[in-house]
Amino acid sequence: MQGVRTRGYNTDADAIVRSLREDLNCEPRGADILLLGAGGAGRVAALKLAAEGARRLWLVNRTESKAEKVAEEIRGAHPGVEVALGYPTTDTRLDLILNATSLGLRTDDPSPLDEARFAVDGAKAVYDMVYRPERTKLLQTAQRADCRVADGTGMLLWQGVKALEIWCGQTAPAGAMRDALNEHLNR
């Protein structure tokens, strides 16, 4: 019996970068970024942001050893990117805070950002991969601090667009998909 070959795709990486550019006008190249979460989505985002030429990445994760593994991957593949574990110093000005944790999925979840360690107003923009509820505690706090904000709706859209294109081999109707997604999310 002959083996079956399959190919897997991850559409997260391109989707997050496209959403950052479109929804926040945030360019990863040369950016200073605090990334909250080093699990599946956080790891993919960190590696993609490094590949896109981020200047500095700070990785914060509940399990520090997981963040250290991601940092080691980045250092090996992208030695020009400065990577640190934990929060930046309070006087650091960030281009972006990106939440890749599950905190925010429930309305009673606390913010994933420890503001005693780094205040949200130290960032120009805040992106939360969570897309429901529309405004997590992190995004509400960031809005009050006059940061540009975006939730994960754009990332979800571009993941779906890319997946449909892979499956069908043709250009996906992104506009119609955006409309359907917004209707489903009641926005």
Image (tube, rainbow, N blue to C red):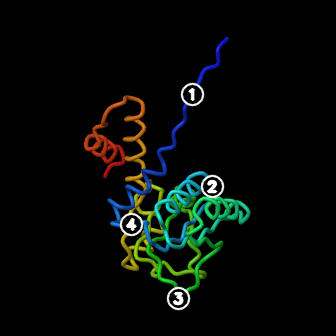
Residue receiving disc 1 = 6
Q: Secondary structure at mark 4?
A: loop
Give the alpha-carbon distance from disc 1 to disc 3, as whole Å: 49 Å
Q: Is residue 10 above or below residue 24?
A: above
**Disc 4 marks which amino acid?**
Glu
Density class for disc 3 (Cα within 10 Å; few <14, some 14-19, many ≥20) is few
Residue receiving disc 4 = 27
Give the alpha-carbon distance from disc 1 to disc 2, as whole Å: 24 Å
Give the alpha-carbon distance from disc 4 to disc 2, as whole Å: 23 Å
Give the alpha-carbon distance from disc 1 to disc 4, as whole Å: 34 Å
Residue receiving disc 2 = 39
**Disc 1 marks which amino acid?**
Thr
**Disc 3 marks which amino acid?**
Asp
Give the alpha-carbon distance from disc 2 to disc 3, as whole Å: 27 Å
| Disc nearer the start of the sequence (1/2) | 1
**Image spot of residue 166 (x, y percent):** 42, 34
| Disc nearer the start of the sequence (1/4) | 1
Q: Secondary structure at mark 2?
A: loop
Are the residues flagged by discs 3 and 4 in contact, CB closer than 8 Å?
Answer: no
